[in-house]
Image (cartoon, helix red, strand yellow):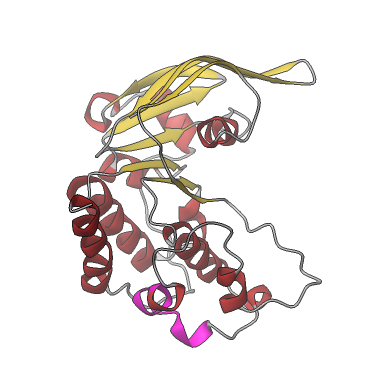
Amino acid sequence: MIQLKNISVAHQGRPILKNVSAQFPKGTLTTIVGPNGSGKTTLVQVLLGQVSFRGERHLSEKIHFGYVPQKAQVNREMPLTVKGFLEAFGGKIVHNPLELLKIFGLEKLQHASFHDLSGGEVQRVLFIRALMGNPDVLVLDEVMAGLDLQGEEDLNQILQFWTKTLKRTGILVSHDLHTVLKTSDHVICLQEHICCEGTPETLQGNSFLAKAGGAAPYKHEHRHEHHPKVCFDRFENQFGDQKRKKAHV
């Protein structure tokens, strides 16, 4: 369980978050929505302990986070392969990155330049990096932006397995109302403070949610960038085995 109480953040005197209180229980997917500049990424930074704040942040136990940012912070002047990028992971590696590349259908790209990857490929590699440490909590910041329809379906399936089978926590920042309403257990609508929150069912038709998502009812826009389907059986075996190992420790 992660709990935030009366969190406030300001930058150069300008308030970014005001008295935000929220809970993120185990086994649930919480989606944070809000217009640009509403404080979503700052709230993620508070969750990760990356920014100073006023208020209280409580973790019920020692929690390991896996974080997928909107963009990779990589010096484009530095030669870097996909394999090299993953091997530079700073934490304890539990899941072999090459095995994860195979699961995500990217094993042929391990020696490719990280800088030559498409947007969707970068998102998958960032996701793999977040999974390598076998995190308790996955925090995903606007990861849908670079994915095609297959990628969205794969991610939704993984998140459902992550929360409902593994009983771990998922936190998603998204503008995609289709994903929010389809996969989330709880939705937080943010505009410096929490404007509304609840289950997708209770928030359907909420005017702020519609504005935060920046969209009317979902309409799929065809994207020409296609990616291989995630081998979900292998993903399930990889992380299901780790769950069983944890249970016997």
Q: Residue at position x 25%, y 73% from top?
A: 234
* In magenta segment, residue 101: yes
Q: Is residue 149 left or right of residue 225?
A: left
Q: Residue 202 in the image: x percent, y percent?
A: 24, 24
Q: Residue 220 in the image: x percent, y percent?
A: 38, 57
Q: Which portion, as a residue range, is magenta? A: 100-109
* In magenta segment, residue 30: no
Q: Quadrant of residue 95?
A: bottom left
Q: Number of numbered discs present?
A: 0
Front residue of this view, candidates 31 and 100 = 100
Q: Residue 159 in the image: x percent, y percent?
A: 30, 52
Q: Would you place residue 233 above or below residue 45 in this image?
A: below
Residue at the front extreme?
Answer: 249
Magenta stretch, main secondary structure, is helix
Q: Would you place residue 244 above or below residue 15 in this image?
A: below
Q: Residue 174 in the image: x percent, y percent?
A: 46, 43
Front residue of this view, candidates 147 and 168 = 168
Q: Is residue 38 left or right of residue 22?
A: right
Front residue of this view, candidates 211 and 19 = 19
Q: Would you place residue 108 above or below residue 186 in this image?
A: below
Q: Residue at position x 33%, y 29% from top?
A: 1
Q: Is residue 187 left or right of residue 38?
A: left
Q: Residue at position x 34%, y 75% from top?
A: 103
